[in-house]
Amino acid sequence: MSVAPRRRDYKEDDPKRKRDIASDDRMRLWMPLFVGTGVGIMWGAVLGGSRFGNAVAGALVGGVVMGGFTMVITKLFIGGASESVSKTLLPSGTSTAYKRQYSDAEAASARGDYQQAILAYTRYQMEDPSDHQPYLHIARIYRNELQDFASAAVWYKRARNESVLDSGKEMFVTEQLSELYLHKLKDPRKAIPELARLAERFSQTPTGQAAARDLAVLREMLSQEHENWESLTARYYKDKRTDEQSN
């Protein structure tokens, strides 16, 4: 089973990391402030010394006045520019939804470099844990390409627990988990909660109705587990083989 990469596994100068707009704006704000305050101090010292005989007081007044004036002007210009940039790069929920790109991860997966693809998708997941797509891509790679079904189940569960899913995606993820436990991991006991979730939350769908039927079978077997001294797992797959042979 692959270990999820840590944050320090990624270089800080990765060109695909999001640009820190706020830090750029702070730099553009503070530089004019320093310059304006410096000019104010010099202007105040000269004027205060020549007119009032107190260069220190003049320098203080000049620094405060020019610094404040510079701050106001700078915020007026940079604040508007920053808002424009933020709306373009990081749009709000009221604007057109921003669609994230996973080009490096998709390219790695397409050329068969699945571990590199997982690393790339994990970076996207760490940057925005609410985005369900990286979780599902990683789970699919583990399930379909690497045949690591236990890791696939872990990432499907993380998608459901950590990201934002609509009802359709929640049903898909829960169905995948139930199928993994029943058909790949051979652990019907763990499939019971997933089938129960499907049957309860999606009872009006064919998927929920099929889950209710499978759940009833498993619960019946579970209730008889101690009576016939045969484990749920052994009973389920013995009956399943019998059904397949009869068909």
Image: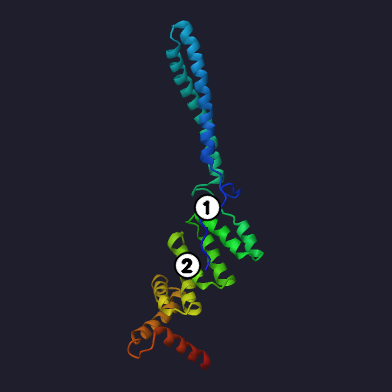
Return the disc, 2 or 1, that comes first in the chain's sequence.
Answer: 1
Where residue 136 sits in the image (x, y, percent)? Answer: 53, 64
Where residue 30 sits in the image (x, y, percent)? Answer: 51, 30
Q: How is the image coloured?
A: rainbow
In the rendered view, tell whether residue 91 sits above or below residue 26.
below
Where residue 231 sits in the image (x, y, percent)? Answer: 39, 85
In the rendered view, tell whether residue 176 sits above or below residue 5.
below
Observer able to see residue 168: no
SS at mark 2 in the image = helix
Tell me what residue is drawn at x 33 percent, y 85 percent: 223
The amino acid type of the residue labelled 2 equals: Val
Q: Which residue is mark 1?
A: 8
Q: Which mark is residue 154?
A: 2
Q: CA distance from mark 2 to mark 1?
A: 22 Å
Observer able to see residue 229: yes
SS at mark 1 in the image = helix
Tell me what residue is drawn at x 45 percent, y 66 percent: 157
